[in-house]
Amino acid sequence: AQKVTQAQTEISVVEKEDVTLDCVYETRDTTYYLFWYKQPPSGELVFLIRRNSFDEQNEISGRYSWNFQKSTSSFNFTITASQVVDSAVYFCALYTPGANSKLTFGKGITLSVRP
Amino acid sequence: DGGITQSPKYLFRKEGQNVTLSCEQNLNHDAMYWYRQDPGQGLRLIYYSQIVNDFQKGDIAEGYSVSREKKESFPLTVTSAQKNPTAFYLCASSTPNRGRGGTEAFFGQGTRLTVV
């Protein structure tokens, strides 16, 4: 069985603060993919990043960065110098390929960035 | 433009009625998924299909049915057996993208179903 845990449910920060969203996953598979999605108030899910289990390099994209650590089964997401437009629900997801492959999502983290 | 189209955006259903939510994709993806989203519950998997004419139950399949007669279409029927159908429903599709080392899921804009 696979599982994604996002222990934080709601986070509120003031604009320009840095914020880290935590994600812990469980799987018995050695090959898997991890994702982060953003869901703005409009409802549609927006893809942010994909990372496969063989690539532990951290990634930075503008104000966004991701820290993948297999030793702790974590894939954390940091927003630097947060902005009001970052306010959304953020989901971490796990995909394991195979005969019954499927995407499993965490419960999401609601991020509110105040001006 | 390639993408996933869900319709309608808003849907109202009377108690005891069946209702079908549409999901169409022109991305040539093999796999399609239906998720339900409730406040504080995140996304829960209802049904998924890896190929045409085949589908599997997800974590909360009771009260729902699906079909996959065409690769591009994966409609979801919410039956009268679903006791609490009011929710936001998201459809997704994916395919292994070996050239980029992985797979990526694309999502529709969602259908908000309300039972009145």
Image: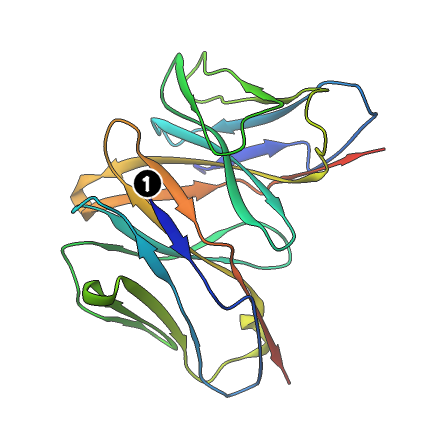
Residue A41 position by quadrant: bottom right
Residue at 60%, 25% (x, y): give it.
Answer: B22
Find residue B42 and report its horizontal and vertical position in percent: 55, 51
Residue A87 position by quadrant: bottom right
Q: In which quarter of the image is the N terminus of chain B?
A: top left
Q: Foreground: A8 or A92?
A: A8
| Rendered view: B32 above or below A13 | above
Name the residue carrying label 1. A1
| Rendered view: A3 above or below B50 | below
At label 1, the amino acid type is Ala
Q: Foreground: B62 or A58?
A: B62
Residue B80 position by quadrant: top right
Residue at 45%, 53% (x, y): give it.
Answer: A106
Residue at 33%, 26% (x, y): give it.
Answer: B30
**Left or right placement of residue B26 versus residue A76 in this view:** right
Q: Which chain carries label 1?
A: A
| Kind of element beneath mark 1 | loop
